[in-house]
Amino acid sequence: MEFRLLGPVEASAEGRPVALGHPQQRTVAAVLLCELGRAVPAERLIDRVWGEDPPSSVRNILYGYIGRLRTALADCGAPGVRLARRSGGYLLEADPERVDLHRFHRLTAAARDGDDRVALLREALDLWRGDALSGLTGAWAEATRARLGDERLAARLELYDASLRLGHHRELLPELRAQAASHPLDERAVRQLMTALYRGERQAEALELYEATRHRLADDLGVDPGPELRGVHQRILSEDPSLAVPEECGADAVSVSEAPVGTGASGPPADSALPRVPAGLPHVVGGFRGRDEELARLDALLPPGPGPATEAAEDPAGAVAIAAVCGTAGVGKTALAVHWGHRVRHRFPDGQLYVDLRGFDHDSEPLRPAEAIGQLLHGLGVARERIPADGDEQVHLYRSLLAGRRMLVVLDNAASVEQVRPLLP
């Protein structure tokens, strides 16, 4: 039996479609599939399917949907698939490999630690058949669709980075053009296309793309290109050999997102110990409006900018500015933080770090501090095999690497003080 969420919500048994019902009933199925193997309380199902205005007889309606789904699954006779009632709610049991969403997550996780990243990421992206949960409406479906769309984009960009490391710029060029056209403000996509164009002896086109992106960022967001995009631009102008096609297409070939910025032909080699400038913020979404008061309050927390020393800049305590963005689910906390982070990126010339702590992610457990610090250290350029195993040593290394640097750290989806405290510089 197969369940599909990465597109229209569908199920099939031995190639024959299984009727999951009308959109609301399919939303119930989608929630249970996202929470596969975990009991979902009726109240949570009602909230995700009907939102804030459920009908008065909503529990009877939900029981009817559950009954019809249970019958449809039982009629298939597929082994290991069962919709059961538990004390904590309703539980759908199935092999995660039979659900495209969970297979996608397994493949992308394997690609982060495996050698054959390109094949694994291609296999993961081939599971998609359009927008996730297509045809379903409501706040939960829309938020989940947006989140999964971000995951799909991140996997695609990781695929392009891995493929460029292997020298596949010619084969990638049509995909990179389409990616940059659909996400013109995503600097990572622009960097990848500029690299492919340069390697394909289209230096002038790569430089024109940079200028067009620079103007678009200024007009739409009021910001300059980030340090990594500026670095690729400078390396193209100087014909930096580190940007050329790798002679040996191995795992240690230069990546457009990992090569040091500003090294010329006479500079240090691409694998030198120069620190890279992390640019970990998620891509910005167009159409952001409002929140002027909140943006102003965040602006007021900015450290002193370049210029004459101020009393705050001379504070021997070196206090770190901390802002907590709070609000109910779906109100736009992440969008606000990411939008502001891109807007003031130039005030943090040493880079930006981002980690999703998954504090309220219904598909996975909250991120433990050790896992979060591992992600942040990797973002700061520490190889995974060199990250200390001891938690105190991790914290010490993390704070040592941030000491004296002007950086922005965004901790998204935090559930507790315990998650956040070890991650403060």
Image (cartoon, rainbow, N blue to C red):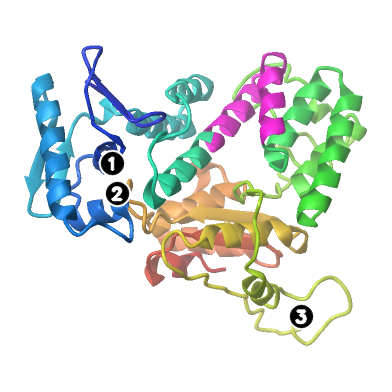
Residue at the extreme bottom of the image, as rendered: 311
At which x and y percent is residue 153? 55, 35
Whichever of callouts 2 and 3 sits on the residue coming sooner in the sequence is 2
Q: Secondary structure at mark 2?
A: helix
Q: Which residue is mark 1?
A: 24
| Disc 2: CA contacts within 10 A as few (<14), some (14-19) or many (>=20) | many
Image-based side of 354 in relation to 73, left or right: right
Please say whether residue 207 is one of the residues in the magenta stretch. no
Q: Give me the residue at 23% from left, 56% from top.
A: 55
Mark 1 or 3, closer to the camera: 1
Q: Which residues are magenta?
A: 153-182
Q: Give me the residue at 53% from left, 58% from top.
A: 334
Residue at the extreme front of the image, as rendered: 56
Question: Looking at the picture, does residue 85 appear above or below residue 205?
Answer: below
Of 31 and 122, the residue lying toward us: 31
| Disc 3: CA contacts within 10 A as few (<14), some (14-19) or many (>=20) | some
Q: Which residue is mark 3?
A: 313
Quadrant where the image shows the C terminus: bottom right
From this viewpoint, is residue 41 visible?
Answer: no
Q: Amino acid at mark 1?
A: Gln
**Disc 2 from disc 3: Cα separation:** 51 Å
Whichever of callouts 1 and 2 sits on the residue coming sooner in the sequence is 1
CB atoms of marks 1 and 3 within 8 Å: no
Q: Which residue is mark 2?
A: 49
CB atoms of marks 1 and 2 within 8 Å: yes
